[in-house]
Amino acid sequence: MLRLIRGLATAAKPKLQDIVIVGGGPAGLSLLLALKNTPSTSHLGCTLVEGLSLDGVRKFAQDPPENYTNRVVSLTPKSVDFMNNNLGSWDYIQTDRVKFYDNMIVYDSQDSEARIEFDTSVVPGAGAIAAMTEVLNIQGSLLEKIEALNEELEPEHRANIVEKARVVDIKQGEGDLDWPVVTLDNGESYQTRLLVGADGQNSPVRKYARIESRGWPYNRFGVVGTLKLQYEDWRSVAWQRFLTTGPLAILPLTGDNATFVWSSTPELADTLLKVDETIFPHLINAALVLEEVDLNYIYKALKANPNDQLMIEEIQWRLSRIPEEELEEKYPVPIAEIVSGSRARFPLKLLHADTYTAPRVALVGDAAHTVHPLAGQGLNMGQTDVAALVETIETGIARGQDIGSTLTLDYYTAKAWPSNHVLMGVCDKLHKIFSTDFTPIVMLRGFGFKLINMFGSIKDMMIKAVSGNP
């Protein structure tokens, strides 16, 4: 009987929509909200399809856990401004779980004197460098704003969110109506004027549109987790140390909390996940301070025995050889503990779609690009995509054009693709330059660090680029 019901539902005529968005992450929810919060596009029939339940997002918005979750992202001031002024979702974000920072220190493990300090407090009009918060906090604020808007809009103009429904088929419409038809595993189907893929790096929408995505894996993993500091760092500093295995970033959260992102080789990533929770904070403290020869010894010992408690004394002894004043002035506040169960890892790669559009298709967020996390720009690039796509749709409507036509959509690719490509190229080159211990390159990059740190004008320009300010 169930198969018969589903068969009848599938055979039914698809529901017509102006825009169908596949993917309920920050990019997808931001696009849905932007369309409904913009007067010239609020009348459009919009449906968002998400394969998972969003109940966890709603629960977080109403009753967040005591400890920070491990999916934490960096928001540039430009993204915060977009969420505040364009989306209206910042009113719903839990500000007590948002940490703005105005100082960032980047240093090289191969040369203790090679470091750059970015301090926006000395740059007129620069503001904060970025804000750290959880992905769930962003999603929760977006979803709450969408639901609030739905109470104000006419029923036929309300945003439609379909949860726990996966896309099983996308095909081009037949006959006079060539709009894509999206079929879901719950038996529903939608035929849409514009199909937007916000469905991640393995995007079914991108595959349907036959858009090539080019790039390469880095043979590296990003290991993340939530930390407790020995005491709250009032300096509001983001730290990043470039190790030959990949950069280690300690990013501030509120109170005595912090998050880390450690880009590492597959072998080291496996060790980082296995190391005993009582040893792990000491390992991070070592990786932030000690020389690579010391670290390689520690890695080897912990690979052989991830539960070797003697390594705590070994690390403490090695750190004790460094003057206490130097540790306090030049390095982060020591890590006290790791929040149990917060460690996770994900593969690092670079992928960029050849174009962001095809007839009646557009891509945003990770469906369009995947970038190395060392600059913390992934989510911000997705927000920029959303802003550019909404502007494109607005322009098409104002000119009386079909919002799914290539004539309309080509503007989106022209506006968003080049800047993303440049940023991804910079991140890729930085990864390659710093993931080597080849002496000539080490000397050159150390000299470059010291030179940049001497010239305030260059640092000011870099601060504005990182923070998304013009």
Image (cartoon, grey):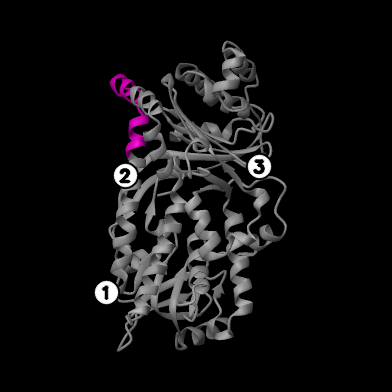
In the rendered structure, does residue 390 fall within the stretch colored magenta? no
Q: Is residue 402 above or below residue 373?
A: below
Residue stretch in magenta = 429-445
Q: Label 1, secondary structure: give it.
A: helix
Q: Nearer the viewer, residue 54 or 466?
A: 466
Which quadrant of the structure image shows residue 415? bottom left
Q: Which residue is mark 1?
A: 407
Q: Specify the amino acid type for callout 1.
A: Leu
- x and y percent of residue 25 in the render? 52, 60
Give neighbour class at mark 2: few <14, some 14-19, many 20+ (Cα, 10 Å): some
**CA gap, disc 3 and disc 2:** 32 Å
Q: Specify the amino acid type for callout 3.
A: Thr
**CA gap, disc 2 and disc 1:** 28 Å
Mark 3 or 2: the one toward you: 3
- Residue 311 relative to residue 263: left or right: right
**CA gap, disc 3 and disc 1:** 47 Å
Q: Label 2, secondary structure: give it.
A: helix
Q: Which residue is mark 3?
A: 254
- x and y percent of residue 382 in the render? 44, 57
Q: Label 3, secondary structure: give it.
A: loop
Q: Which residue is mark 2?
A: 425
